[in-house]
Image (tube, rainbow, N blue to C red):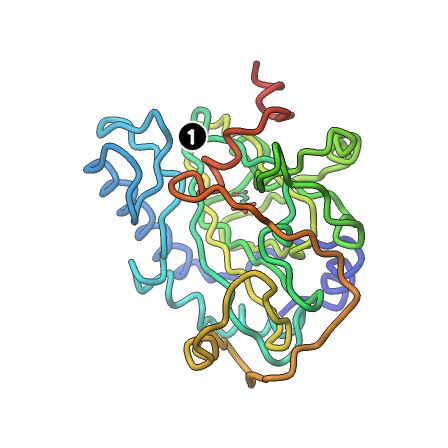
Amino acid sequence: MLTEQQLSFYRENGYVVAPDILTPDEVRTLREATEGFIEQSRKIAVSDDVFDVEPNHTAEQPRLRRLMKPADRHPAYAATLKNPRLLAILQQVLGPDVRLHGLKLNLKPGRGGEPIEWHQDWAYFPHTNNDVAVIAMMINDVDLENGPTLVVPGSHKGPILDHHQDGFFAGAVTDPAAEKVFAKAVPMTGKAGSISIHHARTLHASATNNSDRYRPLLFITARAADAWPLVEKVEDINAFNKLMMTGQPTLVPRMEDVPVRLPFPRVLGPQDSIFEKQRGLRNSPFQRAMA
Ligand SMILES: O=C(O)CCC(=O)C(=O)O
């Protein structure tokens, strides 16, 4: 569970890091599973439905940046969705009734693992109310060298910035005026077994991995059961209700006065990956810093 202090820090700043949430055994199982998938990715040359790899990925030097649908690939990842400590924390943050939005594993290989550009998750998936949050589980230590997630404190209370370029959703902030805001960012670092939580409206990015270590982070995105998605189509209510992690579903969305800018039109196909989508960004503070 989060302490009162951690919870109020989260509410005020839109993020918090909490140490020692996963047990050493849980961390070991997640790490072994993850190392296994890095090994397996040697067999593929380009990204497919399971492995999303960097352009310079090879069998000799595997550069796996995301494992798709991790809960379907290994029981260690699926188990995190039922972990009682994580569920209790989600209830503290989102209320008693919590629905999964998604689980993803971002790996960020060492020696130049790609940055993720500044964005707000809410720009991808706005809901009818503010109770949407992301837990990141640190499977290895995350430090300043290996590409921690960076967050702008308090930005969850601000506007949704423009994420469009040339009339298409670009998946990253394109407003040049936002750069003075990025300068206020802080890194979310911690030992393996720690978690970070950020609000879906919090402005965040992640830096290049300059270490020689992988930086795997397993992300649970979750929402209050009454936070209704404005983009994801709910066509089958039974399937939608199977996403309940704890508590009761509802047919009564809770409406709040939230800022929304829809992520349309989208670029479809392989470009729909956050990495490929963001690659087309003309005004990237990270690419400028590396040039
Ligand atoms: O990998 C990270 O540090 C951040 C990931 C992220 O923001 C995302 O995948 O939306």
Would residue 171 appear left or right of 14 to someone viewing this image? left
In which image quadrant can residue 90 be found?
Answer: bottom right
Counting from the top left corner in percent of width and height, residue 249 is at 55, 83
Would residue 179 appear left or right of 102 to someone viewing this image? right
Query: So how many labels did they put on this image?
Result: 1
Above/below status of 37 relative to 101: above
Instruction: Residue at 59%, 84% (x, y): give it.
Output: 251
The quadrant the N terminus occupies is bottom right
**Nearest the eye: 145 or 73:** 73
Which quadrant of the frame does ligand 1 lie within?
A: top right
**Nearest the eye: 126 or 90:** 126
Q: Which residue is mark 1?
A: 110
**Nearest the eye: 223 or 17:** 223
Above/below status of 112 relative to 268: above
Q: Mark 1: which secondary structure?
A: loop
Counting from the top left corner in percent of width and height, residue 158 is at 80, 50
Disc 1 marks a residue whose amino acid type is: Gly
The quadrant the C terminus occupies is top right
Q: How packed is label 1: few (under 14 Cα within 10 Å), some, or many (20 or more)?
A: some
In which image quadrant can residue 197 be found?
Answer: bottom right
Instruction: Residue at 34%, 48% (x, y): give it.
Output: 34
Name of the residue lying farthest toward the top: 291
**Nearest the eye: 202 or 169:** 169
In which image quadrant can residue 259 be found?
Answer: bottom right
Instruction: Residue at 43%, 38% (x, y): give it.
Output: 271
Counting from the top left corner in percent of width and height, residue 223 is at 60, 68
Queried on whether the Cβ of the residue with tag 1 lies below 8 angstroms from ligand 1, the answer reads no
Name of the residue lying farthest toward the left: 43
Counting from the top left corner in percent of width and height, residue 63 is at 34, 33
